[in-house]
Image (cartoon, rainbow, N blue to C red):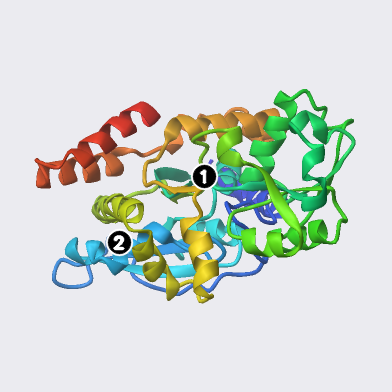
């Protein structure tokens, strides 16, 4: 039985890989990530220290984890975090499946969900990014559009199965646009290629990603709408692990999320700290790094936001992206105890600080 299940999963993974050329919050080239062999998550590496391997997408960076590392939150928890970069979310999730990393942090939401639909044993344990994706239109045409209903008859560039693809196609349907008859979609493998095509006016509209605003504007494009406005609170990158979690894994994951929760507060209060923390990992100029990390429409939150993940799952189904996941119970792929334990520890350690109590109330609203 296990052999048959494994064979089914291997076949599914090939299908998922072919479908998911790039389906993360922000996309980059579809090539193999730079992975390293290291201790398994939770494995003590001497003197009660824990080691964890965290995968991130180069185009998105890892702002909350960067801040937690920069501010010493991980060190305080005796947690050694090894950051492993990837060029595509599909490569990252494949590495997670094959035990080359322990946590996928910025591989989007749609990619892990597509793998789960194919039978992958993955758990969502926390969050990292929400919103931040624009619809781009040539500056000279911006006045021609008042709503998504005005997109009828237009050619739209997309990176298939990315979060913007799902969110904005759902918005089109809500506006009464027939996705088969009223518009033409042109698919691109990378967001960079998509922006170039829109800049060359090869498409009328582009469903873009975060982190490309300066480039888009340099090509004469302007944001028509942001994904947050279309769907407030929609999720992007989730913190994902394998489902086979050991006791020591649990300790490491709790410590990791504890660091992210504290980092979220720092990012809200000090965007300049977020810039400093991410500069070394995102080796670009300050303006570009600041755009990736601190764009006002991009929200960094460690909350799992289960209700929004379920909403995105349902939208993917309605768009025909999860035909193989009809019988998958998504509820079985959330493991919220690490976030709960991390937050409760912070409340206990800071009894006079109302901030973490507010975060607890937000958690209850978004997950329970």
Q: Which residue is mark 1?
A: 2
- The residue depicted at 55 percent of the width and 39 percent of the height is 228
Say whether disc 2 or disc 1 marks the residue closer to the N-terminus: 1
User: Front-most of 186 and 201?
Assistant: 201
Q: Along the line of sight, which residue is nearer the eye, 78 or 364?
A: 364
Q: Quadrant of the N terminus?
A: top right
| Mark 1 element type | helix
Q: Give percent across and percent down for residue 63.
A: 42, 60
Judge left or right: residue 169 versus residue 68: right
Neighbours of disc 1 within 10 Å: few (<14), some (14-19), many (20+): few
* Residue 66 seen in this snapshot: no
Instruction: Name the front one of labels 2 and 1.
Output: 2
Residue 94, horizontal then vertical, whole percent: 56, 58
Q: Quadrant of the C terminus?
A: top left
Compared to 8, does 54 lie above or below?
below
Where does label 2 land, which residue?
68
């Amino acid at each position: 039985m296990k052999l048959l299940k494994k064979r089914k999963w291997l076949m599914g993974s090939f299908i998922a890989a072919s479908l998911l050329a790039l389906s993360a919050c922000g996309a980059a080239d579809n090539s193999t990530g730079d992975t390293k062999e290291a201790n398994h998550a939770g494995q003590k590496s001497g003197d009660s220290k824990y080691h964890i391997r965290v995968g991130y997408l180069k185009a998105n960076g890892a702002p909350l984890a960067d801040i937690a590392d920069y501010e010493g939150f991980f060190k305080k928890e005796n947690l050694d975090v090894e950051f492993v970069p990837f060029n595509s979310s599909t490569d990252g999730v494949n590495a997670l499946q094959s035990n080359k990393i322990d946590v996928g942090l910025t591989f989007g939401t749609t990619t892990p969900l597509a793998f789960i639909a194919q039978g992958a044993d993955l758990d969502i344990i926390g969050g990292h990014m929400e919103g931040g994706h624009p619809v781009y239109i040539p500056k000279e045409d911006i006045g021609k559009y008042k709503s998504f209903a005005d997109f009828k008859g237009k050619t739209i560039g997309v990176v298939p199965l990315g979060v913007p693809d799902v969110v904005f196609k759902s918005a089109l349907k809500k506006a009464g646009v027939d996705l088969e008859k009223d518009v033409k979609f042109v698919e691109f493998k990378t967001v960079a290629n998509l922006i170039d095509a829109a800049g060359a006016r090869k498409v009328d509209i582009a469903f873009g990603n975060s982190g490309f605003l300066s480039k888009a504007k340099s090509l004469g494009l302007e944001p028509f709408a942001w994904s947050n406005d279309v769907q407030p609170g929609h999720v992007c990158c989730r913190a994902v692990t394998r489902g086979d979690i050991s006791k020591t894994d649990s300790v490491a994951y709790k410590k990791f999320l504890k660091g992210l929760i504290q980092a979220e507060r720092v990012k809200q209060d000090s965007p300049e700290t977020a810039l400093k923390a991410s500069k070394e990992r995102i080796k670009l100029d300050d303006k570009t790094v600041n755009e990736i990390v601190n764009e006002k429409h991009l929200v960094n939150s460690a909350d799992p936001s289960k209700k929004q993940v379920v909403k995105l799952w349902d939208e993917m189904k309605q768009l025909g992206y999860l035909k193989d996941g009809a019988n998958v119970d998504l509820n079985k792929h959330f493991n919220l105890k690490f976030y709960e334990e991390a937050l409760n520890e912070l409340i206990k350690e800071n009894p006079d600080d109302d901030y973490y109590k507010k975060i607890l109330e937000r958690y209850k609203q978004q997950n329970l």
